[in-house]
Amino acid sequence: MFHRIMVPFDGSARATDATAMASHLARRTGASLDLVHIESAEAHEREQEAVDRQMSSELTSARASGLEVETHRAVGHVNETIIAACKTSHADLMVLAPHRRNRLSRMLPLGMTEYLLIHSPLPLLICPEQGQRQQSHPTHSLELLHGRDGLVICPLDGSDVAERALPCAIGLARQFERTLLLMRVIVPPQGFASGPQAYAVVRETQCDEEHEACHYLHRMRHRLLHELDTAAVRVETMLLSGSVAEEILGLSVAHEGSVLVMSTHGRSGLSRMVIGSVTSDVVQRTSVPMFVVPAALVFAERRRATASGEVYAMPAAERPTTGSEDADQVPG
């Protein structure tokens, strides 16, 4: 599924978490690792020496476990330099272990994680923080899909942007032999209806949205069943109502050992402050590992699909060679 996994390494405990999760995935998929240290021109020599020692230790440990590992160093501003490293690398996944940012810090210039959610040319795997992982199962938190009830959860909203997360979700479900759960959340009407007629209109609108969402999930599930080998991938659906981020986070916690797979719409600047981003919110609060298809990757694929006349194109690596049988559907 993955061939080369990149880990930005700064010598911190969180970078060690990211390396551990990347190593686990590399062993499972047969991928190699790239540990990349971005040096700041203003960094002190002692700080660089400490990072070098820690990276050497991680290199020795990973190679002792049988992994193919390389280390790289680049100098420059972190955000731009890591993007440049992505473009020159042959990696097909980046693993990050971000620190949580408080509400005030989210109004400041974008941190590396938020920047990469928009601009990264590689899919991202987000490793949750220890405090958040304790809500699920901390002893297995650096292992993907470890629990018996673990699902590959892919939230959809009916857009082609959200659907760009599907190939990654399908690949994980196949690699780990887990159920792929397609979920959608309907947001209840805000405010109060004034009078019986207004209430009836609001209720009718909500029923129409629920019907459309059910039909969409049903159509998407059957489309995948015709494209995939269901002996390896089981597809189920679920429709929920409430706050989108809250429902996604709640479902992921309810099924121990699950992973989330989402794309981002790439909102930034003022729109990010006013409208917010569901994916960014979930990244900040998730207690389970989360794969993200960044906006840059989404829109690059959209341009390619538009040029070729396709609406949604499953990558060649995920295209099946055999037929499929039906699978049970989870009612919403």
Image (cartoon, grey):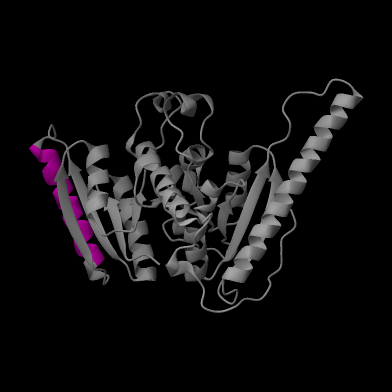
For the residue pair 5 and 143, the one nearer the viewer reads as 5
Which residue of the protein is positioned furthest toward the top in this rendering?
194
Residue drawn at x 15%, y 46% as measured from the top left? 74
The quadrant the N terminus occupies is bottom left
Q: Residue at x 25, y 44 (%)?
A: 82
The image quarter in which residue 139 lies? bottom left
In-front residue for pair 319/3:
319
Is 58 contained in the magenta span? yes
Judge whether 155 appears above or below 147 on screen.
above
Give the prevailing secondary structure in the magenta stretch: helix
Establish if 98 lies above or below 149.
Answer: above
Q: Position of residue 241 (x, y in %)?
A: 71, 42
> Which of the two residues, 265 or 81, is positioned nearer the viewer here?
265
Is any part of residue 135 visible from this angle? Answer: no
* Outermost right residue: 196
Q: Position of residue 33 (x, y in %)?
A: 27, 61
* Image-quadrant location for residue 207: top right
Residue found at x 62% / y 40%: 244
Q: Say above or below: 84 vs 325.
A: above
Residue shown at 43% from the left, 61% from the top? 143
Rendered location of residue 44, percent (x, y):
11, 35
Q: Which residue range is magenta in the image?
A: 45-62
> Is residue 32 in view from this perspective?
yes
Total marks in image:
0
Residue 249 included in the magenta stretch of the image: no
